[in-house]
Image (cartoon, rainbow, N blue to C red):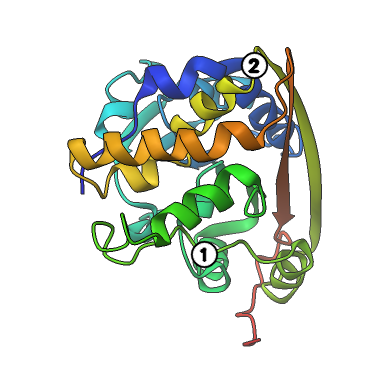
Amino acid sequence: MTDAWKPAQYERFRDERAQPFRDLAALVEPRPGMRIFDLGCGTGELTAELHQSLKARKTVGIDSSAAMLARVPQVPGLRFEQQDINSFAPEEKADLIFSNAALHWVPDHGPLFARLTTALAPGGQLAVQMPMTDDHLTHRTASELARSPMFRRLLGGYQGRPPLPEPERYASWLHRLGHARQHVRVVVYTHLLGSREEVLEWVRGAMLTDYQKRLPPQDWTRFLERYRQLLIPQLDDERPYFYTYPRIHIWGALPAGGSSTAPSHG
């Protein structure tokens, strides 16, 4: 599979994508000399902002896309690594594991949150933000197209990532993992886009990359054009276009004693 992430495409809506990051960062409790890992750091611009605002001793940004990491800033105490989140296993315990709009690409969130919690130092914090858009017309249309005879074979039967669990499930996991305090909320972000056509540009920068990386260029062009034909007529033809985008914010903190437990199944 190819690296389908395009920094310029993703950052067409830079301000809109930055606000959830900053709202998540606002949940973090600053501590002196923090060791931070940012999972799914993208171009690193917001990672640098987090590093500097928290006056961290050390921050490591991790992303699987070489294209995104090609633009990372140079800041003292901040470094970046190309790595899949599935293989994240830090050599030292973290004071904060932060992930903005990335963990929804990773399956099996119960074991994932358990693994991330074990990587935290006593009193460590976990802060995660993910889009909750599985029921969005944009996502349903892509999945339906992937199941069509035209593309099912080309995609090897892939239809889209698994849907996220309900917010209550995340709260339960945090509790069972020993997080002494937690905050789980869903925020509906609203955006005024220039037209309904810009909705396509939005998802081209994120969700659609999951299909693009699985298709040869000529088949991806066909997929995108057919997707456009299916999606746009279903959207209200209004200017500006009122676009709603729900996101889940998850924050948990271990006790200073550092006790944590594995979640039970179910």
Going from the N terminus, do you reach mark 1 or mark 2 first? 1
Residue at the spot x=21%, y=49% of the render?
Answer: 1
Residue at the spot x=35%, y=20% of the render?
Answer: 72
On screen, 243 above or below 34?
above
- Location of residue 225 by image quarter: top left
Q: Is residue 63 visible?
A: no
Quarter holding the C terminus is bottom right
Could you say where residue 125 lies in the image, as x and y percent from the top left?
Answer: 65, 51
Which amino acid is tagged 1? Pro
Could you say where residue 200 lies in the image, as x and y percent from the top left?
Answer: 52, 29
On screen, 89 above or below 30?
below
> Which residue in the structure is indicated by mark 2?
195
Label placed on residue 32: none
> Which residue in the structure is indicated by mark 1?
162
On screen, 182 above or below 213?
below
Query: Dot 1 lies on which element?
Result: loop
Which amino acid is tagged 2? Ser
Residue at the spot x=18%, y=43% of the render?
Answer: 216
